[in-house]
């Protein structure tokens, strides 16, 4: 199996800025790609100097607008810039570009000849913005005109099925006659491909510096995250794949928790984000890519139930599933939210029983189901408040609780159940603004100071509801401890090993 390299895509406007980014991520990258099309016009003329400003092999790329780049002048200007950047080859190869990226349809014999003569490897690339590609091996074979080029195919997936197809086709590249090739997908959905590049035997995976707007539009993570969180260089054919399935899965701490556990226990496994709004696509992808187990999050905790071949007792009791593990004939579902929440709530209240204390459960989604189950087990009396009242009714009646709408008409009811307020909606998740109607699901409720407020959201660390509650003198807790406890249980289900054992 050939090694995959972490490449830092450099889209800064000056050579100095790009060199500083290489320096910043030096210990995490194997190579860099200078996107000359992102430099100012004046700096573009001096691209030739760049390899001697850094200490890793560098790819020379001048990407056209039609291929997703910034270069808008004509092909003559582009050819002139390529020529300048490759000219006057230094005897010291490290001071020359190590690779040059020419698109599939860009053929300038004099440039190709000088690249070959100076030992600059040609990456022959094809970018497809409008969808998946098939027949990848045949297309790559065709791109290797001299037999030395590294063919690269990059596309923007529209569904996770497009990515499942890529995994299937990537197998055609494995074998005795394997050659260096690059397979990658763009956008946040494509992140799973970039992290699992070694499984596809892809020669390169692309990353970007923190704060890069081009990197953000491509869905890139930083080299540090690729290397340190995902242990990229340890991924190989035998690495077991686990993941978190959700949508849009903008922020998740689960990969950090699970991957740190694999590292600590010397387990050859990786935990990746698997993004799709469609749970059937996620399950089909998991089968194709050999994913062994998944944490399941918003909005799939209930939808996943029909995809399971077996369910643990906890899932039957609660009616939602946040963990699936592959067994021979399908996936078995578990629920670790309930035990994770219980452990976190006991830590917050310093009590193991609720002694009929009155609890408001805000929300009636997958997580709320686990929470209602725990509140009942602990002896609390609850009222479920939800935007969709029918869902609140169904959940409340399961446990003999009350239910109510989640709006100003329920303010006095909420006061009746305000010993403990557990916030379980996704409203307020990722909020960066001050508390308002838009990010606080109980904006209409005035805290008195006696309430214990547990918000199961953990980004931001102080959610809008918590900020308001704290200002009124309430005790508050976010969802971080719950996340850790439920994740540690998932780890045990996935690996059979206690997360915190030596
Ligand atoms: P879910 O099944 O999709 O349920 C979402 C809930 O949020 C529903 O009650 C929904 O109401 C409500 N909601 C969504 N947008 C709303 C809005 N704009 N206004 C009012 N209510 C809104 O999701 P889930 O799996 O229960 O997860 C919910 C949240 O808990 C997520 O932020 C998730 O990250 C977090 N969580 C944390 C942990 C942890 O370990 N800390 C564990 C699980 C979940 P409708 O029914 O009316 O749609």
Image (spheres, grey):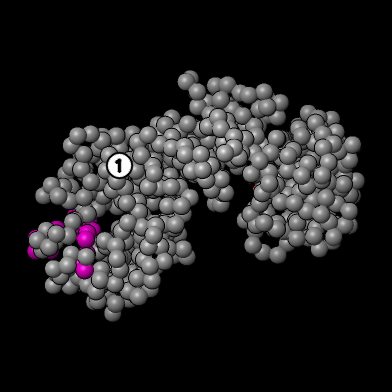
Tell me the residue at 89%/36% (across/down).
Answer: 355
Instruction: Check residue 98 for magenta coloring.
Output: yes
Which residue shows up at 53% across the image and 32% down it?
A: 495
- Residue nearest the viewer, comparing 502 with 364: 502
From what the image shows, is residue 478 above or below residue 284?
A: below
Question: In which image quadrant can residue 440 be found?
Answer: bottom right
Q: Quadrant of residue 158?
A: top left
Pointer 1: what residue? 201
Residue 375, horizontal then vertical, whole percent: 80, 36
Name the residue: 90% across, 37% down. 356
Q: Quadrant of the C terminus?
A: top right
Residue 445 rendering spot, x and y as whole percentages: 83, 55
The answer to whether mark 1 is within 8 Å of ligand 1 is no
Residue nearest the observer in this picture, 40 or 472? 472
Q: Residue 214, can we see it?
A: no
Q: Is residue 33 left or right of residue 428?
A: left
Question: Residue at coordinates 78% horizontally, 41% vertically from top-left?
Answer: 346
Ligand 1 shown in quarter: top right
- Whether residue 195 appears in this view of the structure is yes
Q: Position of residue 320 (x, y in %)?
A: 65, 32
Tell me where the magenta segment starts and ends, as one range.
Answer: 95-113
């Amino acid at each position: 199996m050939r090694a995959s390299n972490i490449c830092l895509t450099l889209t800064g406007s000056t050579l100095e800025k790009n060199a500083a980014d290489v320096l910043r991520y030096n210990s995490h990258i194997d190579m860099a790609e200078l996107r000359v099309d992102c430099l100012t016009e004046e700096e573009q003329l001096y691209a030739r100097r760049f390899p001697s400003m850094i200490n890793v092999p560098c790819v020379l790329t001048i990407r056209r607008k039609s291929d997703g780049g910034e270069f808008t002048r004509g092909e003559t200007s582009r050819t002139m810039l390529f020529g300048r950047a490759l000219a006057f080859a230094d005897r010291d190869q490290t001071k020359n570009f190590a690779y040059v990226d020419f698109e599939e349809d860009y053929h300038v014999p004099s440039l190709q000849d000088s690249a070959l003569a100076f030992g600059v490897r040609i990456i022959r690339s094809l970018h497809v913005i409008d969808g998946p590609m098939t027949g990848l091996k045949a297309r790559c074979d065709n791109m290797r005109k001299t037999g030395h080029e590294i063919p690269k195919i990059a596309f923007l997936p529209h569904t996770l099925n497009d990515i499942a197809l890529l995994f299937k086709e990537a197998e055609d590249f494995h074998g005795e006659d394997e050659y260096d090739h690059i397979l990658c997908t763009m956008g946040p959905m494509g992140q799973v491909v970039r992290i699992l590049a070694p499984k596809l035997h892809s020669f390169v995976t692309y990353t970007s510096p923190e704060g890069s707007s081009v990197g953000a539009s491509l869905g890139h993570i930083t080299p540090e995250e690729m290397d340190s969180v995902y242990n990229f260089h340890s991924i190989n054919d035998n690495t077991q794949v686990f993941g978190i399935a959700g949508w849009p899965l903008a922020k998740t701490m689960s990969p950090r928790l699970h991957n740190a556990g694999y590292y600590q226990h010397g387990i050859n496994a990786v935990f990746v984000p698997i993004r799709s709004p469609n749970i059937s696509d996620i399950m089909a992808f998991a089968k194709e890519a050999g994913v062994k187990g998944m944490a399941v999050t918003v909005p799939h905790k209930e939808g996943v139930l029909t995809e399971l071949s077996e369910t643990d007792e906890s899932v039957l009791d609660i009616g939602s599933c946040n963990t699936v593990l592959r067994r021979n004939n399908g996936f078995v579902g578990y629920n670790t939210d309930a035990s994770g929440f219980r452990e976190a709530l006991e830590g917050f209240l310093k009590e193991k029983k609720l002694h009929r204390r009155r609890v408001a459960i805000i929300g009636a989604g997958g997580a709320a189901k686990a929470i209602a189950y725990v509140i009942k087990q602990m002896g609390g009396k609850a009222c479920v408040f939800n935007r969709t009242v029918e869902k609140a009714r169904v959940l409340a009646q399961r446990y003999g609780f009350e239910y109510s709408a989640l709006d100003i008409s329920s303010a006095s009811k909420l006061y009746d159940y305000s010993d403990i307020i557990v916030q379980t909606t996704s409203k307020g998740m990722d909020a960066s603004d001050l508390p308002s109607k838009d990010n606080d699901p109980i904006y209409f409720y005035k805290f008195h100071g006696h309430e214990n407020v547990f918000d199961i959201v953990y980004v931001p660390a102080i959610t809008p509801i918590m900020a308001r509650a704290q200002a009124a003198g309430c005790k508050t807790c976010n969802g971080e401890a719950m996340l850790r406890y439920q994740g540690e249980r998932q780890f045990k289900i996935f690996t059979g090993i206690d997360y915190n054992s030596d």
